[in-house]
Image (cartoon, rainbow, N blue to C red):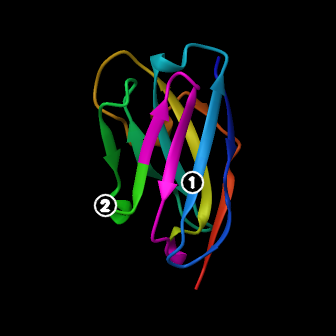
Amino acid sequence: QVQLVESGGGLVQAGGSLRLSCAASGRTFSNYAMGWFRHAPGKERDFVAGISRSGGSTRYTDSVKGRFTISRDNAKNTVYLQMNSLKPEDTAVYYCAADYRRLGPIRTMASEYDYWGQGTQVTVSS
């Protein structure tokens, strides 16, 4: 199995930036596509960004395009989410997730991912 440990959440003013990190252990990191999801109170857990095993392909939900960037460093077994121009609507618990796969498009449904981090709170004040 894969264990995921997240860091980088916190409180930031609107327009500010945060970088979330998720370190993986337990199996070969490069076997997994990785995703970031977020869960706000009263809402479903929604896809935010995903990245392929090699890092060559990315996918974003429309509301964060141009503001968020997902990346990975397979040598460090770590995936990142750089969050710029943050808005109060971005406030949520953010989770990283691992999708064990070989080939195929980046998945966007939470049920398609195999392993999850503990979540980290991101709060954006106005």
Q: Quadrant of the N terminus?
A: top right
Q: Percent x, y for residue 124?
A: 60, 74
Q: Nearer the viewer, mark 2 or mark 1?
A: 1
Q: Is residue 40 left or right of residue 26?
A: left
Residue for point 36% across, 15% down = 102
Write down the quadrant of residue 62 in the picture.
bottom left
Identity, as a three-letter code, of the amino acid under mark 1: Arg
Mark 1 surroundings: few (<14), some (14-19) or many (≥20) residues within 10 A: some
Q: Residue at x 67, y 16 (%)?
A: 26
- The x and y percentages for residue 61 are 35, 55
SS for tag 2? helix
32 and 72: which one is in front?
72
Q: State the mark number for residue 34.
A: none
* Relative to 44, 120 lies left or right: right
- In magenta segment, residue 79: yes
* Viewer-proximal residue among 40 and 14: 14
Vertical order, 49 against 116 (above or below): below
Task: Say which mark, if any, is on residue 19.
Answer: 1
| Distance of label 2 from label 1 (alpha carbons) | 19 Å
Residue type (three-letter) at the residue carrying disc 2: Asp
Q: Secondary structure at mark 1?
A: strand
Q: Is residue 82 magenta?
A: yes
Which residue appears at 36% of the width and 65% of the height?
63
Measuring 59% from the left and 50% from the top, which residue is drawn there? 20
- Determine which quarter of the picture holds residue 33: top left
Q: Which residue is mark 2?
A: 62
Query: Is the residue 109 above or below the residue 53 in the image?
Result: below
Q: Is 96 on the left-hand or right-hand side of 33?
A: right
Tell me where the magenta segment starts and ends, as one range. Answer: 70-89
Image height check: is 31 above or below 47? above
Q: Earlier in the sequence, mark 2 or mark 1?
A: 1
